[in-house]
Image (cartoon, grey):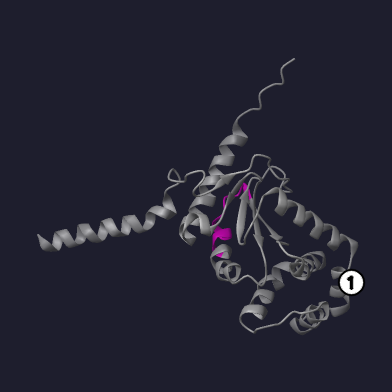
């Protein structure tokens, strides 16, 4: 009997450990997520956008990155991840420009984690633009092309739009996620990484159901 009780106890513990990963009904507005009164713009067409607001120098963003990359591989086909470099202070602008410069060059997927590692593992110090230019060259990018993309009007415009989205979404810290332009969540709200991704999955399901409901005709 004691042996059976041990097996039952172990099974219950295992089930409890999986609850944050499998339960979508448990999320609570005001606790696990917030709903924006005015949705922000999205660029994902018919797909449900999962927007991550991040900052390369943020240690929490760096720690979350491996789990985020794993989650992306299991992401529903009708959803897509969009990374948005946060600009909560003027000193964050160079990192945002670096992201959009790499995006313009078509190498952001290759060097996104490389820049994270350079800062948090190799202790790269970025005090001026030239520090980023030198890093890009050392990492294997064309330095001149990176500088051109970094200083371009297109990059500046994207940084300004990212800044606007942050204000509209009322983002106060990173990493934060906005699902379908209207649901905001973060690990600080959910309490753990598993609960964060469980909440994101639940919000994708919620958004999917809302998309399937026909819009009410306007009253004449």
Q: Residue furthest left?
A: 1
Instruction: Residue at 54%, 40% (x, y): give it.
Output: 206
Instruction: Residue at 82%, 77% (x, y): give it.
Output: 129
Q: Which residues are magenta?
A: 70-79
Residue 77 highlighted magenta (yes or no): yes
Residue 169 highlighted magenta (yes or no): no
Q: Callout 1: helix, strand or loop?
A: helix
**Residue on which the image places disc 1:** 148
> Which corner quadrant holds the N terminus?
bottom left
> x%, y% of residue 115?
69, 75
- Mark 1 surroundings: few (<14), some (14-19) or many (≥20) residues within 10 A: few
Q: Nearer the viewer, residue 18 or 26?
A: 26
> Which corner quadrant holds the C terminus?
top right
> x%, y% of residue 211?
62, 36
Side (left or right) of 184 relative to 108: left
Q: Is residue 41 above or below residue 153?
A: above
Report which quarter residue 83 is drawn in: bottom right
Report which quarter residue 155 is drawn in: bottom right
Instruction: Residue at 54%, 43% (x, y): give it.
Output: 205
Q: Nearer the viewer, residue 40 or 140?
A: 40
Side (left or right) of 127 relative to 215: right
The mark tally for this picture is 1
> x%, y% of residue 161?
79, 54
> x%, y% of residue 73?
57, 60
Report which quarter residue 151 is drawn in: bottom right
Q: Nearer the viewer, residue 86 or 220?
A: 86
């Amino acid at each position: 009997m004691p042996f059976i009780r041990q097996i039952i106890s172990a099974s219950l513990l295992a089930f409890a450990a999986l609850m944050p990963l499998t339960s979508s009904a448990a999320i609570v507005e005001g606790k696990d997520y917030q709903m924006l009164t005015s949705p922000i713009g999205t660029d994902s067409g018919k797909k449900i956008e999962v927007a991550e607001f991040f900052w390369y120098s943020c240690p929490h963003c760096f720690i979350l990155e491996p789990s985020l990359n794993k989650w992306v591989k299991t992401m529903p086909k009708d959803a897509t991840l969009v990374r948005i470099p946060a600009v909560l202070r003027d000193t964050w602008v160079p990192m945002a420009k670096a992201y959009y410069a790499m995006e313009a060059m078509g190498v952001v997927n290759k060097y996104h984690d490389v820049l994270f590692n350079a800062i948090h593992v190799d202790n790269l110090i970025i005090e001026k633009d030239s520090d980023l230019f030198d890093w890009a060259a050392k990492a294997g990018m064309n330095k001149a092309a990176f500088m051109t993309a970094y200083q371009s009007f297109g990059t500046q415009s994207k940084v300004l739009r990212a800044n606007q989205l942050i204000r509209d979404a009322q983002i106060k810290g990173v990493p934060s996620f906005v699902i379908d332009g209207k649901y905001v969540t973060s690990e600080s709200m959910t309490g753990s990484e598993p609960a964060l991704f469980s909440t994101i999955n639940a919000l994708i399901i919620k958004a999917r159901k809302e998309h399937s409901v026909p819009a009410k005709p306007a009253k004449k």
